Image (cartoon, rainbow, N blue to C red):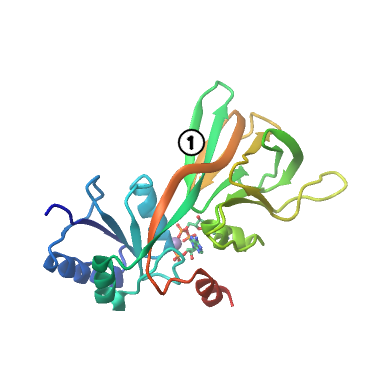
Amino acid sequence: MKKKLITIFANNTEVSLETQAILTKKLIDKGYTVMGEYSADSELIICIGGDGSFLETVHSCDFPSCPIIGINTGHLGFFQEISPENLNLFIDDYEKGEYSIQHLNTVVATITTVDGRQNRHLGLNEIVIKGRQSYSVHFYISIDSKPIEKFSGDGILVATSAGSTAYNYSLGGSVVDPRLKLLQVTPIAPMNTTAYRSFTSSILLPSELSLGVTPEQRENKIFIINDGIETGYSNVKDIKVETSETAVHLLRFKNYDFWNKVKTKFL
Ligand code: NAP
Ligand code: MN
């Protein structure tokens, strides 16, 4: 019978490395081949660390099509599901197929520069659009290609539901149940004076609609930050932010409860 290739990534903390060693041995004893890199034959990716390591794994595997499961050795772990004490239970449930798969949708930004070039950045948590450090930005914002406002402030964050509990929440955005497929557009330090008028709360968009962002001054540098990965652009003509076709597939076991995680983390 052919199957059974599992990829394990771990961050560099002592407990993660120890967990990786123990888990690797257990899986090999069960007949799995265990690798430290992702291959098209991997049936599962296991990521040991916190949410930051989970994001890093998703990006380094280029948003893989196989399922991912996280073992939490970091802080709370919104993506991470298993604790290092429960490795045997996890392996049992996995082998018995006692899990469901949670499909998390992602957000994509397409940047078009004045010379016509295009670049895409994908985020599982969010896309942030900002100016150079300490400078305010002025963006013409459209929804579904229709002008809606001129934004002035530090920048704009567009969060997925899964990303709603990260940077979005720190900015006063709402916590969204990941079963809802939407984008949350949250302003970062919006200016709201007689000179400048911007939305001061988050707005929610259904996944069919896109957000357009056109910088007022093309020559100013714009930064796109997808899940904490920053790229600078000059001469940006416009940016389109929308729900991407790509999903991240998380294994979830019977005790998974999003709202319990929210309660434990924030209250
Ligand atoms: P980081 O600056 O080390 O992480 C910031 C915190 O966000 C960490 O505690 C991380 O959890 C947590 N986190 C990440 N994704 C989350 C999610 N979906 N729900 C709840 N918490 C989450 O950077 P990082 O670890 O590489 O993570 C990148 C993320 O940091 C970005 O996507 C952005 O959302 C977030 N961020 C937040 C702020 C802010 O809140 N002011 C500022 C910049 C970036 P772990 O400790 O488990 O890694
Ligand atoms: Mn981190």
How many callouts does the rendering have?
1
* Side of 147 relative to 71 (left or right): right
Q: For the N terminus, which image quadrant? A: bottom left
Q: Answer whether residue 114 is visible to the viewer in this image.
A: yes
Circle 1 packing at 10 Å, graded few (<14), some (14-19), many (20+), is: few
Judging depth in this view, the residue of 75 and 153 nearest the camera is 75
Considering depth in this image, is 13 or 199 the residue closer to the camera?
A: 199
Q: Position of residue 195 (x, y in %)?
A: 85, 44
What residue do we see at 53% from left, 60% from top? 178
For label 1, the SS is: strand
Query: Is residue 145 rendered to the left or right of residue 178?
Result: right
Residue 156 in view, yes or no: no
**On screen, residue 230 above or below 29:** above
Tell me residue 71's x, y (percent).
34, 68
Vertical placement of residue 100 versus 207, above or below: below
State the image quarter where residue 255 is shown.
Answer: bottom left
Please state, as top left, top right, bottom left or bottom right, where the C terminus lies in the image: bottom right
Q: Residue at x 20, y 68 (%)?
A: 21
Residue 49, image quadrant: bottom left
| Ligand 2 found in image quarter | bottom left
Residue 175, image x, y percentages: 60, 63
Residue pictured at 69% horizontal, 54% vertical: 202
The residue that mark 1 highlights is 120
Q: Which amino acid does the dot numbered 1 rest on?
A: Arg
